[in-house]
Image (cartoon, grey):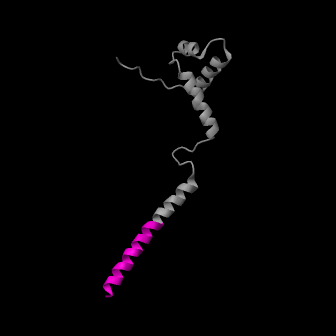
């Protein structure tokens, strides 16, 4: 049994489907069937839009906390430099003997 490919829907379509399910006399399942969607799809879209609203505008392709990421990168660089200096100190101490 093959699975049907999912169709991408616009944000406006999703919002309108959610509005129809909330305001209309029909249940979300009935609205979904009439629109040719899976039964629980409207509920999933509603959850997704609520999560997006709570998270605020997202930056695409960038971590949520740039300052933390930059600080962690700096710490890793400094640790690497420190390790190199320790090895150099051991090497030169060994050479002077």
Q: Residue at x 62, y 22 (%)?
A: 18
Residue 4, relative to residue 71: is it above or below? above
Identify the magenta region.
Answer: 78-97
Q: Residue at x 57, y 31 (%)?
A: 48
Q: Nearer the viewer, residue 60 or 56?
A: 56
**Residue 43 spot, x, y in % from top left:** 57, 24
**Residue 55 spot, x, y in % from top left:** 61, 40
Q: Residue at x 47, y 23 (%)?
A: 7
**Residue 58 spot, x, y in % from top left:** 58, 42
- The number of numbered discs placed on residues in the rendered structure image is 0
**Residue 81 spot, x, y in % from top left:** 44, 70
Q: Nearer the viewer, residue 75 or 70?
A: 75
Q: Looking at the image, which residue sits at the far bottom?
A: 97
Can you tell which quarter of the image residue 10 is in? Answer: top right
Assess whether residue 6 is covered by the magenta stretch. Answer: no
**Considering the image in quadrants, where does the C terminus appear?**
bottom left
Residue 11, relative to residue 92: is it above or below? above
**Considering the image in quadrants, where does the N terminus appear?**
top left
Q: Looking at the image, which residue sits at the far right?
A: 23
Q: Decide if residue 24 is on the left or right side of residue 1.
A: right
Q: Decide if residue 63 is on the left or right side of residue 89.
A: right
Q: Residue at x 60, y 35 (%)?
A: 51
Residue 87, relative to residue 11: is it above or below? below
Assess whether residue 92 is covered by the magenta stretch. Answer: yes
Q: Main secondary structure of the magenta part?
A: helix
């Amino acid at each position: 049994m093959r699975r049907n490919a999912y169709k991408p829907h616009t944000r406006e379509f999703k919002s309108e489907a959610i509005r129809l399910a909330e305001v209309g006399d029909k249940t979300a399942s009935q609205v979904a069937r009439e629109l040719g969607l899976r039964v629980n799809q409207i509920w999933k879209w509603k959850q997704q839009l609520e999560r997006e609203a709570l998270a605020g505008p997202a930056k695409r392709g960038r971590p949520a906390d740039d300052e933390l990421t930059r600080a962690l990168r700096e710490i890793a660089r400094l640790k690497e430099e420190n390790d190199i200096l320790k090895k150099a100190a051991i090497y030169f101490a060994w050479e002077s003997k």
